Amino acid sequence: MPRVGFLDKNHISGIKKVVLSNGITVFMEELPERKKAVFLAGIGAGSRDDPLDLQGISHLVEHIQFKSNQFRSAEEIPEDVEDGGGRIHAGTDSHSTVIYIDRIRPYLLSKNIRILYEIISNFEYNTDEIEREKLEASTEIRKHIEDPEEYYLGHLFIPSLLRKTFGEKPIPGNRKTIKKITKEDLVDFKKRFHLPNNMIIIVCGKFDGERVLKKIEGTFGRLKLKPLESREFKISLINRRKEIFKKRKGLGLVYLALGYRTSGFDSYDSLKLMLLDSILSSGMSSRLPKRLTNERGIGYDELQSVYDDYGGIGVFYITVGGFDPRRFKEARNIILKELEDLKTNLAGKREFLRAKNQLLSEADGAMDDLQSRAEWLSDCYFTKSIFDPRNLKKYISKISREAVRRTAQKYFGQNYTLTALVPENFEK
């Protein structure tokens, strides 16, 4: 039975939830102590929805939102937002696309809601602008591929870990598929997925809730309800041992990633996995910086553990970027030793408390920033997160060291995926 995310509930502390007649779900969190507001529209479509022959189309649709529409030119959109001090942004990941305006003064909120509505509701685009955007997207992809720090994670490790699933598709797509995408393809994709019943609105900060809701109903509430195609995105959590080495001419360093498929944010294990992440790499006193950087001088620039949700699957991985190829085995063995220790022994009491406090501080920092707050809430909605990030302390205080050890035992087995971008003359 599917779990219910905390934002799926009818009553949410501190947030007013309204479902419009066309299916759009509106979340309004009034924070009168703040000076400004953020307005976000989130769509439940991302790279996992890209057809194989049109990979990158969801990301390209996000990009063309800022191009000329039937209401404003590509120059007028940012000008009209920025005149009042606001900024417009967008982002695409595996499971969703967000478009939002932050730093909005309360008296300008209605104007900015209108601008975002015009962007979302528009299906008329300039062909020349789209072709220029495709060239820019293709150049961006080339940069990602040529930059080892970008390539070894997004184009090597993640596709290897999530091979033969929707998760292996890189969000930007590839140059071949981007080249063949037409204006008609983009409009068709937007018409299929940018529907009110596949959309949320999040408003955070200082605003008049009654006025804002009325403005939303008069704009976004006019979008027509249409059938949304059924989609299933669950991926097997079974891990299989893989070690993949990609040689590159002219490269002098090694870029290593090692990790597992795990449960996602809709799981009760999610906070324990976040704590394992914090134990391993949150701050210079955490395990990996101690063992690798401080004691051995490995991984100054790119050393981290990450727990994330790809919309149907969780991933937990460790990256060590840009280090001496002769120390590859040493780095790999230390990582595996630390993972094994987390399975065998309880984390130290002081270490465990420190990891909890680091996680809470990171969450508090995100909640203090309105842009991050709205983005996190949107991510929680689309990943069905069962924990409210505004109240993590309540949940984390109940988690024991033994519970975290059991979680490590559950996920950190011998069947890991390891990828390494290595020099041409590298020998295992």
Image: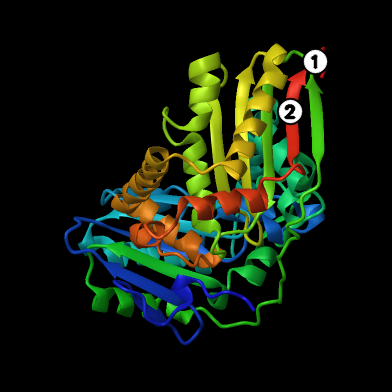
Q: Quadrant of residue 229?
A: bottom right
Helix, strand or loop at label 2? It is strand
- On screen, 271 above or below 5? above
Q: Amino acid at mark 2?
A: Ala
Which picture quadrant has residue 370?
bottom left
**Would residue 195 be seen by someone viewing this image from the given angle?**
yes
Q: What amino acid type is highlighted by mark number 1?
A: Phe
Distance of mark 1 from mark 2, alpha carbons? 10 Å
Which label belongs to residue 318?
none
Residue at 31% x, 63% y: name it.
204
Which residue occupies the foreground of this view, 405 or 187? Answer: 405
Q: Quadrant of the N terminus?
A: bottom right
The residue where tag 2 is placed is: 420
Contact (Cβ within 8 Å) of mark 1 with mark 2 = yes
Residue 95: where, in percent of width, then height?
Answer: 61, 59
Direction bottom: furthest residue: 21
Q: Which type of secondary structure does the marked residue at label 1 adopt?
A: loop
Q: Is residue 76 visible?
A: no
Q: Position of residue 64 (x, y in %)?
A: 57, 53
Closer to the camera in the image, 78 or 36: 36
Q: Identify the residue under disc 1.
A: 426
**Image coords of residue 37 (percent x, y):** 28, 59
